[in-house]
């Protein structure tokens, strides 16, 4: 009972002491832990980092009358509602889930960065995820991507330590360190892309299986160590912008490389894949078949199954 009253008192104390603060370009740069609503009267893109750092407990954003954006229930967007600029770090998502409106096409730089409450997001029709958009969202464990994306920006999902799987049907470009330090990431399904930039999955040491596109790669895709990798599929023969790097280094002795039928001899001649003791051919791999592949088991039967 004492604990209940103490908790109730603490909640009432925080509620009574939480406040709304209006800021412009001259606001004092310090930590405001007692502010839960911020009225933004300055350029979001210019002061976004300062706002994120100075208001760690903010739950809602509002905007001044002359602002070129709107507040959609506390989330800042452009007036045409096609781009999300900034979401509060402690926004009260229902069950930790947020679904983008169908009109949203762009998630701006650092829009959800360091969210403490976002667990699941449905990106609906979003086709551009800009730099750092979901960086350090430690509770984020599910992302639903649209069928085709134009770009996933630099460090867009960096340090999303709760993210376990990524399924993207098609993306034009995966930029530098897009998923760096997603240490719990296990499943990676990206069968189609034009370019995979430097260190996209650096230090994603939990990956057990992956489907990667036939495209141009720059430097190490996985980084220096992939200790749990068991199954790696390639949807064609990759090319390299920087030929001094390996796509993967230090993998388990039982890891298997799966290549499209008719390409196995070309892969055997590529030093990038010399660490794979076994290379097998396959014809096609669907998302549902890929999901059924289990660690430590051969994938040939699943890879040829019809859905």
Image (tube, helix red, strand yellow):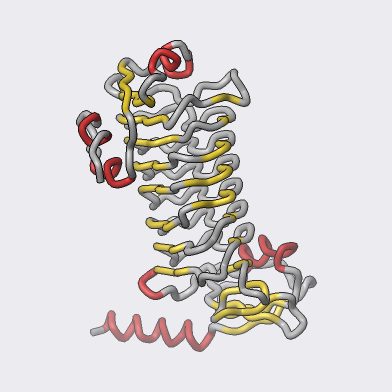
Residue 144 in sight here = yes
Which quadrant of the figure has residue 111?
bottom right
Which quadrant of the figure has residue 296?
top left
> Where 296 falls versus 140 (above or below)?
above
Give how far across and how far down residue 267 sits, in percent.
43, 17
- Residue at x-position 25% and y-position 46%: 307
Residue 35 in sight here = no
Residue most extreme to the top: 269
Give how far across and how far down residue 88 sits, in percent.
55, 71
- Residue at x-position 23% and y-position 43%: 292
Of residue 192 and residue 139, the one placed in the foreground of this image is: 192
- Residue at x-position 60% and y-position 46%: 154
Which quadrant of the figure has residue 299?
top left
> Where 214 falls versus 39 (above or below)?
above
- Residue at x-position 47% and y-position 14%: 270
Of residue 3 and residue 106, the one placed in the foreground of this image is: 106
Give how far across and how far down residue 220 sits, in percent.
53, 28
């Amino acid at each position: 009972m004492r604990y209940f009253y103490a908790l109730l008192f603490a909640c009432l104390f925080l509620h009574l002491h939480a406040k709304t603060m209006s800021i412009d370009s001259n606001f004092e740069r310090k930590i405001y832990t007692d502010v839960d609503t911020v009225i933004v009267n300055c350029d979001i893109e210019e002061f976004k980092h300062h706002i994120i750092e100075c208001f760690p407990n903010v739950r809602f954003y509002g905007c001044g009358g002359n602002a070129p954006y709107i507040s959609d229930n506390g989330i800042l967007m452009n007036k045409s509602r096609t781009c999300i600029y900034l979401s509060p770090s402690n926004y009260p998502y229902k069950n930790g889930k947020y679904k983008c409106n169908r009109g949203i096409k762009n998630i701006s730089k650092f829009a959800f960065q360091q969210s403490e409450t976002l667990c699941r997001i449905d990106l609906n029709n979003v086709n551009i995820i800009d730099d750092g958009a979901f960086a350090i969202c430690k509770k984020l464990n599910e992302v639903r991507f649209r069928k085709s994306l134009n770009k996933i920006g630099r460090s867009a999902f960096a340090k999303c330590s709760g993210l376990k799987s990524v399924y993207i049907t098609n993306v034009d470009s995966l930029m530098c360190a897009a998923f760096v330090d997603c240490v719990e990431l296990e499943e990676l399904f990206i069968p189609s892309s034009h370019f995979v930039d430097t260190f996209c999955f650096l230090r994603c040491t939990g990956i057990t299986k992956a489907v990667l596109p036939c495209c141009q790669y720059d430097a190490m895709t996985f980084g220096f160590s992939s200790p749990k990798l068991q199954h790696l599929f390639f949807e064609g023969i990759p090319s390299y912008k920087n030929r001094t790097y390996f796509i993967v280094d230090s993998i388990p002795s039982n890891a298997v490389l799966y290549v499209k039928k008719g390409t196995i001899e070309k892969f055997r001649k590529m030093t990038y894949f010399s660490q794979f003791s076994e290379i097998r051919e396959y014809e096609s791999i669907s998302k549902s078949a890929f999901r059924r592949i289990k660690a430590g088991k051969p994938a040939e039967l699943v890879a040829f199954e019809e859905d």
